[in-house]
Amino acid sequence: MSATPPATLGPDATIGILGGGQLGRMLALAAARLGLKCHVLCPDPLSSAFDVVRRVTEADYSDHAALDRFAADVDVITYEFENVPAETALFLAARKPVLPDPGVLATTQDRLAEKAFVTGLDIGTAGFVAIAASGDLAAALDVVGRPAVLKTRRFGYDGKGQVTIRDGVDPLAAWNAIGGQPAILEAFVPFEREISVIAARERGGAVACFDVTENEHRDHILKTSRAPAAISPAIADEAERIATRIADAFDYVGVLAVEMFVAKDGAGHALLVNEIAPRVHNSGHWTIDAASVSQFEQHIRAIAGWPLARPIRRGRVTMTNLLGAEIETYRAALDEPGTAVHLYGKAGVREGRKMGHVTRVLPER
Amino acid sequence: MSATPPATLGPDATIGILGGGQLGRMLALAAARLGLKCHVLCPDPLSSAFDVVRRVTEADYSDHAALDRFAADVDVITYEFENVPAETALFLAARKPVLPDPGVLATTQDRLAEKAFVTGLDIGTAGFVAIAASGDLAAALDVVGRPAVLKTRRFGYDGKGQVTIRDGVDPLAAWNAIGGQPAILEAFVPFEREISVIAARERGGAVACFDVTENEHRDHILKTSRAPAAISPAIADEAERIATRIADAFDYVGVLAVEMFVAKDGAGHALLVNEIAPRVHNSGHWTIDAASVSQFEQHIRAIAGWPLARPIRRGRVTMTNLLGAEIETYRAALDEPGTAVHLYGKAGVREGRKMGHVTRVLPER
């Protein structure tokens, strides 16, 4: 809980951003459109977000002296990644408003707590069992069946910290592969498609969702997002209701992403929540070029105490991540009519690293 | 002429920007989308563009040591205002490519040279006569008639440095009002409307124009721009041809704006060029929200040696400047569906100062 009640920011205010990756960078660019200043704190001297703000703090998240100076320089603090250490968030929240509330992080940093939170709202998820020690695995596999996915409770992203246990896989080998740490065993969902809802919630409680997005992953990393998703209006409405219920339950302020599976369920379909990201999200990047307001501006508006915009989508849109060496394809994309190219200015190319994205917009059918 | 032949920039390059106002700010934001870094040089410590870049030089345009360090830090140099001192441009051009070529400034900084350049291309302008001394005024008024507009040859913008000589006005009083300096006397054009063409030209010579924009001024300051302009396709084509001819004649690289009057001419209409701005232009701000590429990105692409995009306009658009205390109306605009709000983060409100703008987009009729 933030110690200071958040006030509405004036246009001369400064927003503190924890994390200096491309999400922080695009948040800072959105804030700049609105006349707001940003100060980015990140331990990495080559942070992509450092290049687009005047004030930066290159410091570890546990450096209290640096955090203290950072807090003194800003009016409100937000974050671009969900693994902000709880201790950092609490230290800062005692000094300046932190939005979304750090309490959200406690839930979303722990797959078990997150799943329990979601099911507590009567929202479906894949079946799951907590795994405290390797001895729990056999009984858990009896409950969820095979294939199952063993995931660390904490610090997983982009497929890191998870192993699929298919027929013939030794559960103990899987346990060792994820480092023998507290985990969750999830039933494998034979989904038809993956979707996400990017929802923004303002301090007064109003929620605005972007149109539901359909996502394709490659090696557990998002490769392509399409909006609108190829789902029925009824499923789209249900997906937005689920995201809204989650945002309301958190008393959330800012943008949050809810990833879901669309799975066959008898003659119909069921929506199962896979993950909540308490931040702007890769699957919402299309909103920069193909909506009347971007997810980044919605987040800035929400944490500034400004009214949310009602997003209007323009056309059918496909966002494609440029991963690793794929960044070289930007030159060809520059020549495509109606295609927007975004590069993140990162210094080093590594396999699977998110280097940029391109957004292609086609007229509505 | 730049000493070094300009190379195509890689995505890790740094662009130097002379001038730290809102145009420099929006150029830097467009460069950031493309992964390019910017370094802004401006004498004003409160420069609006300083807030969105990591590297700034607060120095006078005549500070050779600062200019030298600035040039050493960047790969290409551009400017956001046409009154860059010629000496500054030449000093920098000896060190790094300056685009658009500083030679353009010599023409566009001098109303007489600019008018002579335009008429030399067989493009129409208001009638004009050079005024070197007050003694030239009487004969000049006989040529252009009354009302006429007396304008300083140099450093005029937003109506500064000009006086209208109507019937009964003493020409000598007008001469004194503009400071008794070299001037140009222009015939008053009873125009139907004012339009502008924002054209981008890449190094290879290809030109891409945005749809012709119609402008309304208030007290000589741009208040509203609308695209498309309410003119016939034939006049729009002619306007784009004029802008292209001017860009070609300069062997221009980057974005340039050509302001024109649409005047009755017998049964038809004539286009008269009023002013050339060798830079991104206020009347092109609508392109950020209502075109597939913005004027700012086109400028960055051109000076980076990257291909221009072919701009596609989305809907009918109105851009309204927030001047001085009008900035307070941004809160109401935040609530309007489909309206984009841009604030420039300027510290002080002054009458007529450009503090931000709002862009309203309506579906195509």
Image: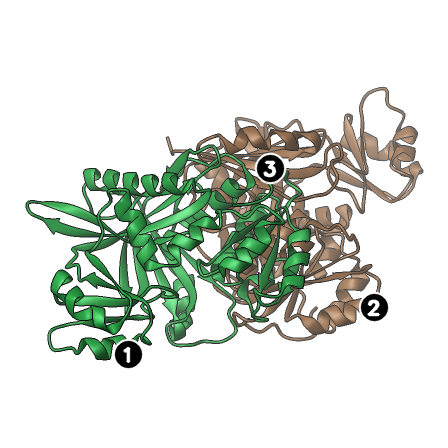
Chain colours: A brown, B green
Secondary element type, mark 3: loop
Q: Which of the chains bears the disc numbered 3?
A: B
Q: Quadrant of residue A9?
A: bottom right
- B254 vs A178, nearest the viewer: B254
- Residue B279 shows in the view: no
C-alpha span from label 1 to label 3 = 48 Å
Q: Is residue B238 above or below residue A113?
A: above
C-alpha span from label 1 to label 2 = 63 Å
Amino acid beneath label 1: Asn
- Mark 2 highlights which residue? A64
Secondary element type, mark 1: helix
The circle drawn on residue B176 is 1
For the residues beneath circles 1 and 3, the answer to whether they share a chain is yes
- A55 vs A96, nearest the viewer: A55
The circle drawn on residue B7 is 3
Q: Is residue A298 above or below residue A173?
A: below
Amino acid beneath label 3: Ala
Q: Position of residue B94 (x, y in %)?
A: 60, 49
- In the picture, which quadrant includes the C terminus of chain A? top left
Amino acid beneath label 2: His
Query: Which residue sits at x=26%, y=60%?
Result: B216
Q: Is residue A181 left or right of residue B310?
A: right
Query: Which residue sits at x=34%, y=61%?
Result: B320
